[in-house]
Image (spheres, rainbow, N blue to C red):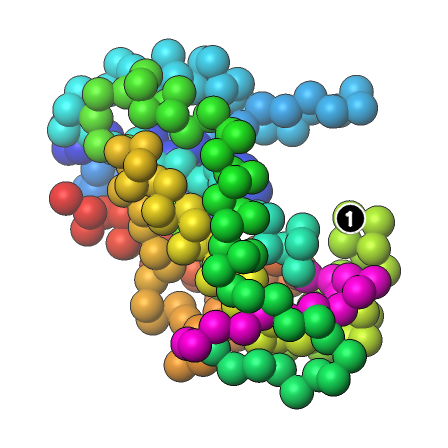
Amino acid sequence: MGTKILIFGDSHTKSLKLALEDDNYCDESPIEIRWIKVEKKGKTTGNLSLEDFQKKASQLNSNDMVVISILGTGHNILGLVRHSMPYTLFSRQSQILPDNEALVLPYAAMKQIFKEQMKKNKTISSIRKAVKCRLYHLATPPPKECNGFIADQTSKYRNNIVTEQTLNAPLTRLNIWRAEMEALEELCEEWGVTFVNPPTETITDKGFLRQEFYNKDATHANHLYGHRVISKIRGLR
């Protein structure tokens, strides 16, 4: 039997699950995908608790792989919808948006905000202690550039009304995502976890998610993106 691959995470693992259901992987290393079990307001989502996942992952041998997708959604929470005090980010690597109403924040400051927030989450370090095999953390998909598409697919996000006018400018959303992914990558290195960037072929020249990989919502990628991620996971050695 080949290398076992156990994938554990939140809603961003759905694209991978759909990709597995769409293809025949009989001759490949066995992959199991489980969603974090969460109980909230009397409703349960997911199918495996963190405790049970750690027990399961601890039984894998050193040649196997654990791939997680747990952190990395803060850019949407903070930046999908335009704040009551609009802002954009500045860095030497990115442009300033032509928005006279926006407060310009240092890119490094936003990155540090993400880093401090994610440091409070002890889940990743506890998983690292529980498993003896290789451990990877997936980046979340980059933002969708088209505000019109997002507004057509989503009317509300976390109790915020979504229209083309209420969404942040695409470049602002992209820079917030980049700041979070850089912060997460640096923390993964501290935790002894390998960070996995999105497959290059899924990203436009500007850095956004390519349109053929859009899921029909505001924040997720589709099963075609899942195919590319699974191929990249299989290539990790």
Residue pictured at 40% horizontal, 81% vertical: 205
Query: Is 216 placed left or right of 158 in the picture?
Result: left
82 is within the stretch colored magenta: yes
On screen, residue 214 above or below 99: above
Query: Is 30 placed left or right of 213 in the picture?
Result: left
On screen, residue 55 above or below 137: above
Q: In this orientation, which residue lies closer to the viewer: 160 or 12? A: 160
Residue range (magenta): 80-93
Looking at the picture, how far across and down is residue 217, in whole percent?
Answer: 67, 60
Report which residue position mark 1 lands on: 158
On screen, residue 12 above or below 190: below
Say what secondary structure mark 1 lies in: loop
Is residue 136 visible in this depiction of the protein? no
Is residue 186 visible in this depiction of the protein? yes
On screen, residue 73 above or below 133: below
Bin the neighbour count of mark 1 within 10 Å (Cα to Cα): few under 14, some 14-19, many 20 and up: few
Residue pictured at 83% horizontal, 55% vertical: 160
Q: Which residue in the rendered view is the most extreme toward the bottom?
A: 98
Q: In this orientation, which residue lies closer to the viewer: 119 or 65? A: 119
Q: Amino acid at mark 1?
A: Arg
Looking at the picture, how far across and down is residue 38, in whole percent?
Answer: 63, 24
183 is within the stretch colored magenta: no
Looking at the picture, how far across and down is residue 138, in whole percent?
Answer: 39, 46
Residue pictured at 26% horizontal, 14% vertical: 59
